Amino acid sequence: MDKLDPDDSRAPYVQVTEKLRADIYDGTYAPGDKLPSLAKLVEHFGVSVGTVKRALGQLQDDQVIVTRQGQGSYVRATLPPAAVETSGGLDNVYDQLATIRQLLDSVERQLRAHD
């Protein structure tokens, strides 16, 4: 099971989205591969069906996967560049800023511990 980080300030669906996106771009799921079923993803991440559906919806909006009714979700044959994360609008920017803020807080705590 790939539990979500309870200290991560991002919404659970964003964490699931990014974990699946990373798996796709690192080759765990190749273009054309079928993703695990909703039930398996729910079990794998320890989240609700709604959270997984929202994550898959985001990946579909980002043109990373395609979902076929009754057949499942598949990695697109042609993926958008991994480094270009412009979709998601302002919410995506806020999520990225929250992640940066969390990393900075962690570094500051480590620096204070060494003083």
Image (cartoon, rainbow, N blue to C red):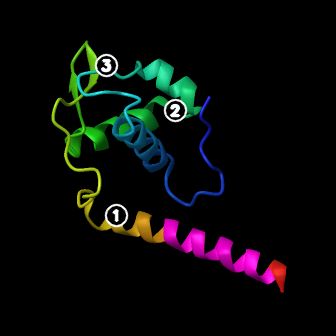
Please state if 79 lies on the left or on the right of 59 as rendered.
left
Contact, mark 3 vs mark 2 (Cβ under 8 Å): no
Please state if 44 lies on the left or on the right of 17 as rendered.
right
* Amino acid at pointer 3: Lys
Q: Residue at the location (21% across, 44% down)?
A: 61
State whether residue 15 is above or below residue 95: above
Residue that numbered label 3 is attached to: 34
x, y (%) of residue 83? Answer: 29, 57
Q: Residue at the location (34% across, 40% down)?
A: 25
x, y (%) of residue 29? Answer: 36, 27
Contact, mark 1 vs mark 2 (Cβ under 8 Å): no
Residue that numbered label 1 is attached to: 91
Q: CA distance from mark 1 to mark 3?
A: 28 Å
Q: Secondary structure at mark 3?
A: loop
Contact, mark 1 vs mark 3 (Cβ under 8 Å): no
Q: CA distance from mark 1 to mark 2?
A: 21 Å
* Amino acid at pointer 2: Ser
Q: Residues within 10 Å of mark 3 (few under 14, many from 20)?
A: some
Please state if 62 lies on the left or on the right of 13 as rendered.
left
Which segment is the magenta one? 99-112
x, y (%) of residue 73? Answer: 28, 24
Q: Which residue ends up furthest to the bottom in the rendered image? A: 115
Foreground tag (1 vs 2): 1
